Image: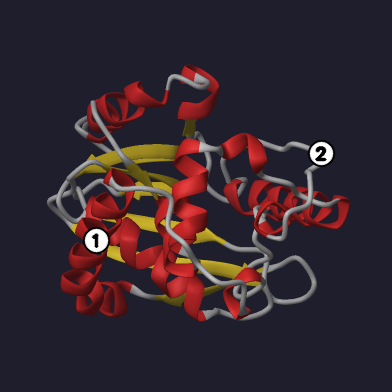
Amino acid sequence: MIYRLTKSKFIRGLQCEKALYLDVYKPQLAYYPPETLARFRRGRDFEAKVKSLFPNAIDLSQRLGHRIEKYPELTATMLAQPGEVNLYEAGFVYNEVLVLADVVHKDADGNVAIYEIKNSLSVKDVFRRDVSIQHYVMSNCIDRLTSFQIVYNDGNDEPLYEELLPTAREAKALIAKQVEHFKEVLQGMEPSVERGEQCSTPYECPYARYCSGKVATQLELAEF
C-alpha cells in the first residue's frame, strides 16, 4: 500500500501549503505548546467515551500499532465478514490518500455508517472538510456507505450527531482537485508563504516558530 497524503496532512494543506510540505519532509520542526497537548488529551477522553457506545468493536490500532500500511487490508477483511461489525481506527486508501475512521459500523444488511468524533460544541467548517476528504477515499472503498456523521460535544460530554454525507458528496469533485494539487506541491521545493491569518486559523500551526525564525524547544511528532 502506497500513500502520500493522510487526512491530517490534507487538512494541514488547506490551511497552509508550506505547513503541509513541512509535515511531510521536516516534521521534527513541529512544536505543540502544553495547552495544545492538553486539548488533544481532552479530545481523546471524549473520543473514548463515544467509542464505548459501539459494543464488541475491533480496534485496529491495538492489533496493528504503527504498521499503518496494513490497516486497509485488515479493514477490508473485517468488513467482508457477515453480520454486524464495529471497527475503531479502520483504514482506507485511495489515490495515494490514507484515512483512518474513528468508528465504522456495518449493520447486518451490509450498510456502512462512519462516525467522526470531535470534542467541540459545534460543527465547524473544518470538520466538514475533514469528513469530505474521508468520504472521497471511503466512497471508493465501500459499496454501501449510507451515513457519515460528525459526533460532537453537547457541553456535558454527551454526544450530539449531525449527518454530513450529502455535504461530503457535493464536495467530492473539489476534493479530488485539491488532492492532485497537494501531490504537485509535495513534488516541488518548500513553498514560500508569508505569515498571516493561516498561522492560527482554523488551528494554531505547529510550524509557526520555524516560520518566525525561532528554534523549537519541544517536539511532538504524533499524528492526530
Label 1 residue SS: helix
Image quadrant assignment for residue 212: bottom right
Residue 177 sits above or below residue 143 on the image: below
Residue marked by disc 2: 218
Q: Residue at x 60, y 63 (%)?
A: 118
Residue 142 sits above or below residue 116 on the image: above
Q: Which mark is residue 104?
A: none
Q: Give the number of callouts.
A: 2
Residue 142 sits above or below residue 65 on the image: below
* Direction from residue 201 to residue 24 in the image, left or right: left
Q: Nearer the N terminus, badge 1 or badge 2?
A: 1
Q: Residue at x 51, y 46 (%)?
A: 22
Q: Position of residue 143 (x, y in %)?
A: 12, 51
Residue 86 sits above or below residue 127 on the image: above
Q: Position of residue 78 (x, y in %)?
A: 29, 29
* Direction from residue 25 to residue 223 in the image, left or right: right
